[in-house]
Amino acid sequence: MSRVYNFSAGPAVLPEEVLKTCAAEMLDYHGSGMSVMEMSHRSKEYENILDTAEADFRELLSVPDNYKVLFLQGGGNTQFAMVPMNLMKNKVADYIVTGQWAKKAAREAEMYGKVNIVASSQDKTFSYIPDLSNLDIDDDADYVYICQNNTIYGTTIKELPNTKGKTLVSDVSSMFLSEPMDVSKYGVLWGGVQKNVGPAGVTIVVIREDLITEDVLPGTPTMLRYKTHADNKSLYNTPPCYNIYVCGLVFKWLKEMGGLSVMKERNEEKAKILYDFLDGSQMFKGTVVPKDRSLMNVPFITGNEELDKKFIAEASAAGFKNLKGHRTVGGMRASIYNAMPKEGVVKLVEFMDNFEKNNK
Ligand SMILES: Cc1ncc(COP(=O)(O)O)c(C=O)c1O
């Protein structure tokens, strides 16, 4: 068996220990004589898997008691619709557009009400985070929406916007569980798990209880109401059982690693290795304003498309996979989520250094 260094933006690398546990428990989960894949979602065993996953997640992120944690399906794109359908009581929302995902979310919300773009960094290809300290927040806005880590462009909102008392909704997909967060600052935070938390197919929503109401936009399907899932402890219908089980194993792994403060330190250390190299290189350049750089997604270019292609091909042949930048921006991107070991980043930098020397 040989494993590569997988720098994919998602679905992405998972901790090897977790994959080994999955393999060991594949045919017989804890003496049940069956795989978790084969289990009824109403069984005692599965209930225990779900309850433990939720408890561990709450502990890791210090989720306050007045927030519900929901394990949903439909990916990030479904949240783009669920958020307005459930929260747009006045039919007004303010969106901060710092990348394609926030832009897509804003477009989706336009189907349900008035959307104000109160800040955007599109003028410079989303390479920075605008000042969010004094925005023109609409008095009627039901919420202010952000995408906190921009997977494609590699920026992170490090200072939350001043929402002037309005509910903050955040897409944290590509930074989920990479560092501690103060959940009480958000009305809703949600993330697709396929980047940092588990296999694609689960979206975890953390939502303050007072925002879970029957008062949703007319026509909101039962499955798209937060209340449906909150009232039924994420078991209204058949959940993605196996994927939630794997997320649960990742939570255990994170706890064993020392929790989110330790992960943050590790992620800072890994990102620094790569950014320091980019800052010193004559060939490779980071594309983001340094103060707004993401710890998770690191885009970079050589400035020469042919050289980019050569680099990606040679890197792939050497076992550094999925370094091609997003199709909308080109260049390269290394996603260095929780499960990417420091060694992977060190070796990538060595490879880049050699490539630079050999291609002067
Ligand atoms: C930050 C962010 N939000 C939303 C999405 C969309 O998620 P999905 O493909 O699960 O709909 C992605 C996907 O890469 C993402 O990176």
Image: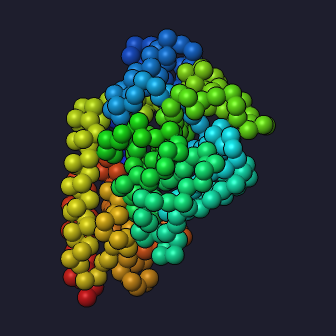
* Viewer-side residue, 204 vs 106: 106
- In this view, the residue farthest toward the right is 219
Q: How many marks?
A: 0
Quarter of the view holding residue 49: top left
* Viewer-side residue, 251 vs 204: 204
Point out residue 87 in the picture as x, y percentages from the top left corner: 63, 40
Quarter of the view holding residue 95: bottom right
**Image position of 208 with respect to 166: above or below:** above
Q: Can residue 58 be seen in this snapshot?
A: yes
**Image position of 335 with respect to 89: above or below:** below
**Image position of 321 with respect to 205: above or below:** below
Point out residue 238 in the picture as x, y percentages from the top left corner: 62, 25
* Viewer-side residue, 123 vs 232: 123
Residue drawn at x 53%, y 13% is 43
Q: Relative to residue 240, is residue 2 drawn left or right?
A: left
Type of colouring? rainbow
- In this view, the residue farthest toward the front is 139
Point out residue 321 in the picture as x, y percentages from the top left corner: 38, 61
Residue drawn at x 40%, y 62% is 155
Quadrant where the C terminus is found in the figure:
bottom left
- In this view, the residue farthest toward the bottom is 360
Residue drawn at x 49%, y 49% is 164
* Viewer-side residue, 64 vs 336: 64
Point out residue 252 in the picture as x, y percentages from the top left corner: 32, 29
Q: Relative to residue 132, is residue 20 drawn left or right?
A: left
Residue drawn at x 70%, y 54% is 114
Quarter of the view holding residue 230: top right
Q: Can residue 190 be seen in this snapshot?
A: no
